[in-house]
């Protein structure tokens, strides 16, 4: 199930870590505009998005709809904050636009919408639909002879939707080997801990039983994330692939990590500058640990 990652170029890892830090900063900038939102999730998924948007995805911000692109589909529309931050890092959006987040006439609505924002592939929000859409797009790409990949980001709460498992069966049946699903296992959903609401553990066994290649790792270990995503893309195995990432809500801002775990977080006005400071501190510690 889990394989031990092989060492990678330290400069490559460093670039991703720096990008993850900026993605977290961009998430905080947007969240501050509203004072609340899906902040914990944006901080928990930043490392995964940094690996994807700075290393793995074949994308061109000047041609966001190019046929010859990988598709990153956000099934969980409420993670839009995180996606806009990653799209900013990838130069699809200017940093200044983050100030318009979730405001009237903004291109950055609170739940991501395909027609509003360059680089956004699907309109998310109604949980359980993403993997089915990913199947269709992956199938279409194969029929066209494209070697591009579809990445679909789901959440642990979304695994409670039966339609996700119908889609998982379809992907395996049709040997969609150009599909990589990623599940954010932050053990959180709207009403509490996912493992207490409706446990999907052992989730790796479930996906394996459905005919998928499965990997699982710490969602903040950039090196492990990169190794697994490279391997899942390169393997010749005809099965669809899934990476389960174990993450910490609020990662990088200690008082949010320690706060009662909430699906929708409110941060008081005086806490924002502290949040930015704490984020900078945790990034500095990470850099020192890696010898920088
Ligand atoms: C079909 C559907 N049912 C309910 C909701 C309301 N809803 C929005 S997010 C969410 C929690 C889902 O779990 P997860 O994404 O793991 O939560 P998080 O980790 O973001 O706290 C729910 C129930 C929805 N968006 N779609
Ligand atoms: Mg969750």
Image (cartoon, helix red, strand yellow):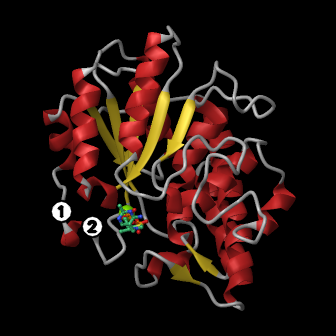
The residue depicted at 68 percent of the width and 41 percent of the height is 119
Q: Distance between the residues labelled 2 and 1?
A: 6 Å
Q: Is residue 143 left or right of residue 1?
A: right
Q: Compare residues 82 and 249 and report the one nearer the observer.
A: 82
Question: Hey, which quadrant is residue 285 in on the image?
Answer: bottom right
Q: Compare residues 208 and 110 and report the one nearer the observer.
A: 110
Q: Is residue 226 left or right of residue 284?
A: left
How many neighbours does mark 1 have within 10 angstroms: few (below 14), some (14-19), or many (20 or more)? some
The residue depicted at 62 percent of the width and 32 percent of the height is 55
Asked if the residue under mark 1 is in contact with the one under mark 2, i.e. CB atoms within 8 Å, the reply is yes
- Using the image, determine if residue 283 lies above or below residue 203: below
- Whether disc 2's CB lies below 8 Å from ligand 2 is answered yes
Dot 2 or dot 1: first in sequence order is 2
Q: Residue 151 carries which label?
A: none
How many neighbours does mark 2 have within 10 angstroms: few (below 14), some (14-19), or many (20 or more)? many
Q: Residue 23: percent from the left, percent from the top? A: 67, 55
- Using the image, determine if residue 282 lies above or below residue 123: below
- Using the image, determine if residue 23 lies above or below residue 250: above
Mark 2 lies on a secondary structure that is helix
Q: Residue 74: percent from the left, percent from the top? A: 51, 47
Ligand 1 lies in quarter: bottom left
Q: Compare residues 223 and 31 and report the one nearer the observer.
A: 31
The residue depicted at 60 percent of the width and 30 percent of the height is 57
**Label 1, on which residue?**
199
Query: Is residue 245 visible from the viewing direction of this image?
Result: yes
**Label 2, on which residue?**
194
User: Which of the image's four quarters has the N terminus?
Assistant: top left
Q: Residue 147: percent from the left, percent from the top? A: 51, 13
The residue depicted at 64 percent of the width and 90 percent of the height is 268
């Amino acid at each position: 199930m889990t394989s031990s990652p092989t060492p990678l170029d330290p400069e490559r890892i460093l670039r991703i870590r720096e990008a993850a830090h900026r993605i977290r900063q961009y998430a905080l900038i947007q969240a501050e505009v509203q004072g609340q939102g899906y902040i914990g999730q944006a901080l928990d998924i930043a490392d995964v998005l940094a690996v994807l948007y700075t290393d793995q995805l074949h994308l061109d911000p000047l041609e966001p709809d190019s046929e010859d692109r990988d598709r990153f589909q956000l099934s969980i529309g409420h993670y839009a904050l995180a996606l806009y931050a990653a799209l900013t890092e990838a130069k699809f959006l200017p940093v200044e636009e983050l100030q318009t987040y979730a405001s009237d006439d903004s291109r950055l609505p609170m739940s991501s919408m395909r027609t509003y924002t360059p680089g956004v592939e699907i309109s998310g929000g109604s949980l359980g639909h993403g993997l089915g859409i990913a199947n269709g797009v992956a199938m279409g790409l194969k029929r066209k002879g494209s070697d591009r990949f579809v990445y679909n980001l789901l959440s642990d709460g979304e695994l409670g939707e039966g339609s996700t498992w119908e889609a998982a069966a379809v992907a395996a049946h049709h040997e969609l080997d150009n599909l990589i699903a990623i599940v954010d296992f932050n053990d959180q959903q709207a009403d509490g801990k996912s493992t207490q609401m409706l446990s999907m553990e052992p989730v790796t066994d479930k996906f394996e039983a459905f005919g998928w290649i499965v990997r699982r790792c710490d969602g903040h270990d950039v090196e492990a994330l990169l190794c697994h995503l490279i391997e899942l893309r390169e393997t010749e195995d005809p099965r669809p692939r899934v990476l389960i990432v174990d993450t910490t809500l609020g990662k990088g801002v200690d008082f949010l990590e320690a706060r009662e775990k909430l699906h929708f977080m409110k941060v008081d006005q005086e806490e924002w500058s502290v949040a930015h400071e704490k984020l900078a501190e945790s990034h500095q510690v990470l850099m020192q640990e890696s010898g920088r």
